[in-house]
Structures are given as C-alpha cells and as structure tokens.
Amino acid sequence: MGLWSTLKRKRQRADNAGLVAALVSLSAEDSRRLVEKDYIVAGHAWGVEPADLHAFALTESAGQGFGPNSRLIINYEKHVASRNTKPPHAYISEFPEFYARHWGGVTNLPSWHPYFMSQPDRWDLLARSADVNFMAALRGTSWGSFQVLGENAEMIGFNDAFDMVKYMYSGEAAHLDCAIRFLRARNAMEDLQAGNMRQVFAAYNGEANVDDYDRKFSRHRKRTGKLYA
C-alpha cells in the first residue's frame, strides 16, 4: 500500500470513528412494542389480515424491534457487507472477521458466526466493522422488527442506510413502515394481501429458505389467529 493510500485509509478510519460514535449513541425514541391494535390499524390501512401481518413480524425477528438497551435488534451479514465495499469483496483478506464472499448456508457454521451471537456481541461486531467501512457495515446489517437490510435503504426511499437506521429509532411503527415499503418495492404487497406467504418470503428473504420461513410463519399464525378471532 502506497503512502497516499495509507493516509487516505487513516483519514477514512478517523471519519468512521465519528460516525460509529453517532450510531452507537442512538436510542429508541419510543420503545413501545407493537400490539394488536397497531396491527389492526395497519392491516386495515393496507388491506392485509392483521393476524398475517403480526405473524409475519414474529417470523422475521420474534416481533421485537429493540433490545433491553433500546438499541435496534440487528443481524450482521458478512457476505452482504462484503458485496457493499468498493470494489466488492476488497477487504476479505485483510478483515475476514467482518467480510465473506458467500453466505454459506445455516448448516455447519462455526460457533463464532454472527447468527449465534447475542445482540450485544452483534453490536460490537457491527461497530468494529463500521470502523473499517461504515456504510458497508450498515448496508450489510438487517435492522429492527422486520430485519430490513441496510442495502435496501435507497430502494425504499431513504438517502442511505444511516438515514433508514435513524428513522427506525423513532419506534416500531417505523419498522413496520419500512417492511411495507420493501414489499411494495418488490411488488409483493398483493401476495401479502392475499395471504400468499411463500411468495412474500421469497420476495423478502430470497428463494433459499422459503420452507423454513413458511413453517415458522404457520406456527406463529396459529397463535395470532386466536388474537384476532
């Protein structure tokens, strides 16, 4: 690495440090959980069965948008962060803890994989990754009750992933709004309205694990169906 590249990297890390400090200082303005009334109002507004909407939220992240410390519930995706560096995958050899070329599935994962981490440990990993490349880290993380990936921020109407994250800190109603924006952008609202959840999960999470999401949804739907009977 040449002198100019070294100086540029140091400056970027210094800028990132300030952004990371701003990120970790954020706290929920309204940490109230969404309740049945919220799903009824939203469901009527969008023509969706409230029980389906509630079960969808439970399927995506147990229906919880904020942790006990009022930080957003997150999941850091190494392969998504890596494809959001410039150029893509440029940091893998230097920072394998933060970046990977492929997802690798959910079987045979090492014990240190982010999927097995607590929320505090995931936030620690995110902060350290963001110190290297702030926006790639945010774009490579899924956020809130509906686990919307940061890389989709522009597609659903935000300037960038940080804008989306800050909006989500206003409360869980914003999380639901982001999920609906995403489904609209992926032309999946008609499927949600019709209860075609396999198509919804394919649009929302990709084709790879539709069966798993559908099974989880079916379990949650049995419970939410009783709430809105």
Image (spheres, rainbow, N blue to C red):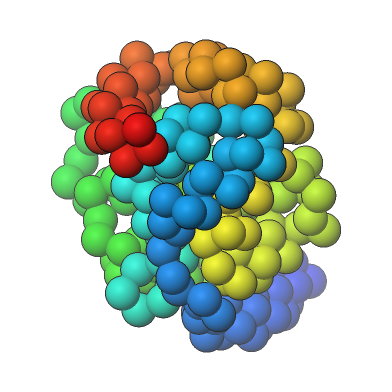
User: Percent x, y for residue 91?
Assistant: 56, 50
The C terminus: image quadrant: top left
Residue 137 sits above or below residue 157 on the image:
below
Q: Is residue 193 left or right of residue 95?
A: right
The location of residue 87, given as percent across then percent down, is: 72, 44
- The mark tally for this picture is 0
Residue 108 seen in this snapshot: yes
| Residue 56 in view of the camera | no
Residue 37 x/y as whole percent? 48, 54
Q: Nearer the viewer, residue 170 or 12?
A: 170
Residue at 41 percent of width and 17 percent of height: 210
| In the displayed structure image, the side of residue 167 where residue 27 appears, left or right | left
Left or right? Give the position of 153 relative to 211. right
Q: Quadrant of residue 14?
A: bottom right
Q: Is residue 19 above or below residue 171?
A: below
Residue 54 image position (x, y, % from top left): 43, 41
The residue at 67%/26% (across/down) is 189
* Near-viewer residue (136 or 225): 225
| Residue placed most toward the observer, 179 or 148 | 179
In the image, 200 versus 190, the foreground residue is 190
- In the figure, residue 2 lies in which quadrant? bottom right
Q: Residue at x 58, y 59 (%)?
A: 173
Rendered position, 11 above or below 136: below
**Residue 128, image quadrant:** bottom left
Location of residue 28 with respect to 139 vertically, above or below = below
Q: On the rendered image, what quadrant is the N terminus found in?
A: bottom right
The residue lying at 25 percent from left, 61 percent from top is: 118
In the displayed structure, does residue 218 sit left or right of residue 101? left
Q: Residue furthest front?
A: 229
